[in-house]
Image: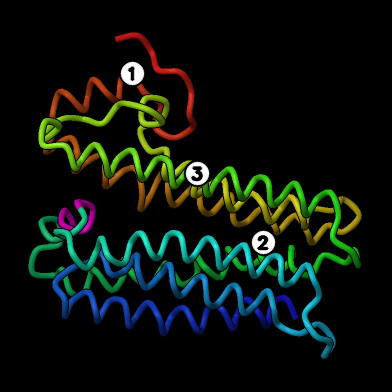
Amino acid sequence: MLLQLVLGVLAAMLVIMVAAWAFGLWRNNGGWTDVFWTWGTMATLAGAALWPIGGADPAPRQWLVAGLMAVWGLRLGLYLTPRVATHPEDARYASFRGQFGKDYPRNMLFVSLPQAPATALLSLSVILAARAPEPELGLRDALAVAVFAVAIVGEYVADGQMKRFRADPANKGQVMDRGLWGWSRHPNYFFQWLGWGAYPVIALDPARPITALSLAAPVVMYILLRHISGVPPLETAMLKTRGDAFRSYQARVSAFFPVPAKRA
């Protein structure tokens, strides 16, 4: 059943990401890729969490895990959707236009499609957490909710700090290095990654080796955010627009994990 659910998530997300690619080309804004991925991931993974076990109604833990996915998707989706709809194209996707040139439409398809198998890998964590065999909710479920809550609040605070910084005309052309952004150059990405750690907290069980697959979500999200689609393209764009100010920021502040900044 695990493999069938993962393959179902993969098939659904391939359709969604092709739609994201086509819509982004139509709107001339690659940022719609993130919007479609967020809502699609929320819907497919919540559905996978609630998929019946042996024909029975969803158990409380299935509802809990689906609820965590819904909160994650609503928070991120309601932040991204109006931003993409009303703001200039995100710097990451704008940089792709320069890199890809006339091949932009074709290459953007290969930017969009890999996000489908990424969601399929994330589903391993969600499905295993939803199907943890303990009949009643317990301490591990409470710990998972606590981890998730810290992640959601941290992401909300980081996004709010950046929004207020950008809204102040006096900060135009400056680098945000205050609040959480003085501890990590990408605290929003860090807290987004942290939230995926909630599922292994529920699922991991040394007596069931298959539950080691529940580590897939935090591992995949770290690789994506820190090394592929998150930090690298955004920092490349920031170096072009902020130059030495951003280089100084890079020298002082951790790229991902929040730690005290080095002295200037």
Secondary structure under tag 3 reads: helix
What is the C-alpha distance between the residues marked 2 and 1?
34 Å
Q: Quadrant of the C terminus?
A: top left
Dot 1 or dot 3, earlier in sequence: 3
Q: Which numbered tag is attached to residue 190? A: none
Which circle, 1 or 3, is nearer the viewer? 3
Q: Residues within 10 Å of mark 2 (few under 14, many from 20)?
A: many
Looking at the picture, which amino acid does disc 2 mark?
Ser
The residue most toward the top is: 263
Counting from the top left corner in percent of width and height, residue 21 is at 28, 76
Relative to 163, is 174 on the left or the right?
left
The residue where tag 3 is placed is 191
The residue where tag 2 is placed is 125
Counting from the top left corner in percent of width and height, residue 261 is at 40, 17
Residue at 43%, 80% (x, y): give it. Answer: 14
Relative to 77, is 210 on the left or the right?
right
The residue where tag 1 is placed is 252
Dividing the picture into quadrants, the one containing residue 93 is bottom left
Question: Magenta span covers which residues?
Answer: 91-96
Q: Is residue 201 magenta?
A: no
Looking at the picture, which amino acid does disc 3 mark?
Phe
CB under 8 Å between discs 1 and 3: no
Q: Residues within 10 Å of mark 3 (few under 14, many from 20)?
A: many
Which circle, 3 or 2, is nearer the viewer? 3
Residue at 41%, 69% (x, y): give it. Answer: 37
**Residue sitting nearer the eye, 45 or 70:** 70
Dividing the picture into quadrants, the one containing residue 238 is top left
Relative to residue 115, is residue 146 depicted above or below? above
